[in-house]
Image (tube, rainbow, N blue to C red):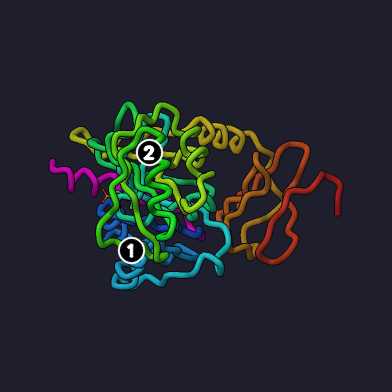
Amino acid sequence: MSQEDNKRQAAVAALSYIKDGIALGVGTGSTVDHLIDALPPHAARLTAVVSSSERSTRRLEAAGIKVSALSEVGELDLYIDGADEATKHLHLIKGGGGALTREKILAGTSRRFVCVVDETKLVATLGKFPLPIEVLPMAQSFVARQMVKAGGNPIYREGFVTDNGNHILDVHDLRIANPIEMETRFNQLPGIVTVGLFANRRADVLLIGGASGVRTLQSRGFWRTQTVLASAKPCSLTPGDAVSATRPLSDHARADVPLLRATAPSSRRCCRSAPNSLHCCPIGSP
Ligand code: 5RP
């Protein structure tokens, strides 16, 4: 199987995370292109699709899928995107396609982030792939000097302007022993718009396409959510209730809509506060 076949099988495997009535965020890159190509039969099940780049928007629209603005949709239920490098801890380097800022926004606003890669992207330590950093043009040399001080070798991505009108520095030779610490530290530097490390908000699920099929790695938090859901108290909503979105009820409970199997922790129950909105409230409250 070629690398492209492995990207395709990982992308297609992500379709199984699409549930009826969800709002989907779509990433950017050649792996995600396979997802977009396979998406049209599932489009009617989605309440909204939000794109992370002009490139993905064009491809989605060419496939007949309507793209909505994030501000119209609010929170996303699921975000699917590729990566340039991934570890078994589900920390990522992203931004090879230059869409890292919008990608980080969509990942940050999504309840679940499924990352799709071919097996060449799985590494023990991040940093062989140069770390993309989106910078305001006027801050480019300042940030480049800071990257040299941090032990890196920044290269200006010649002739590339991001969808946000900014520039990219690709920082080679960084030793990324602690991705969370480095992401947090670099985020403090003025002029940096986005660091291509996705560690503070890592993936929840990593689907890795390889010679023997698609391997799945999941974060511990993802499993915790599943366990709590299974033991949670059923909500009072009944099939037929007009609820059109899947939204969190609390850190530990969710309503799966329109499956209408809303759940809450044992001391709480699910209340409907408006036609399209659920919240968690104490048992006995009106
Ligand atoms: C774009 C990205 C991509 O997800 C990353 O570059 C992987 O791309 P591909 O799927 O083409 O290998 O972060 O900004």
Please state if 234 lies on the left or on the right of 40 as rendered. right
Q: How many marks?
A: 2
Say which element carries label 1. Answer: loop
Give how far across and how far down residue 81 sits, in percent: 37, 50
Asked if residue 242 is positioned above or below residue 124 in the image, the reply reads: below
Q: Amino acid at mark 2?
A: Leu
Q: What's drawn in magenta, residue-wise?
A: 1-21
Task: Tell me the kind of residue under disc 1.
Answer: Val
**Quadrant location of the N terminus in the rendered image:** top left
How far across and how far down the image is residue 135, in percent?
A: 42, 54
In the image, which is nearer the foreground, mark 1 or mark 2? 1
Cα–Cα span, label 1 and label 2: 29 Å
Q: Is residue 82 above or below residue 272?
A: above
- Disc number for residue 210: none
The residue that appears at 41% across and 34% down in the rendered structure is: 150
Indicate the position of residue 39 as horizontal and vertical percent values: 33, 60
Q: Height in image: 258 above or below 9? A: below
Q: Which residue is mark 1?
A: 161
Quarter occupied by residue 257: bottom right
| Residue 9 in magenta stretch | yes
Quadrant in the rendering for residue 103:
bottom left
Q: Which residue is mark 2?
A: 206
Which residue is painted at 78% across and 37% down in the image? 267
Q: Position of residue 231 (x, y in %)?
A: 63, 33
**Which residue lies at the image location 66% right of the left edge and 45% below the top edge?**
263
Ligand 1 closer than 8 Å to label 2 CB: no
Q: Residue at x 59, y 36 (%)?
A: 230
Q: Residues within 10 Å of mark 1 (few under 14, many from 20)?
A: some
Which of the two labelled residues, at mark 1 and mark 2, occupies the earlier sequence position? Answer: 1
Q: Is residue 164 left or right of residue 59?
A: right
Q: Please give left or right for residue 145 compared with residue 129 in the image.
A: right
Asked if residue 285 lies in the magenta stretch, the reply is: no
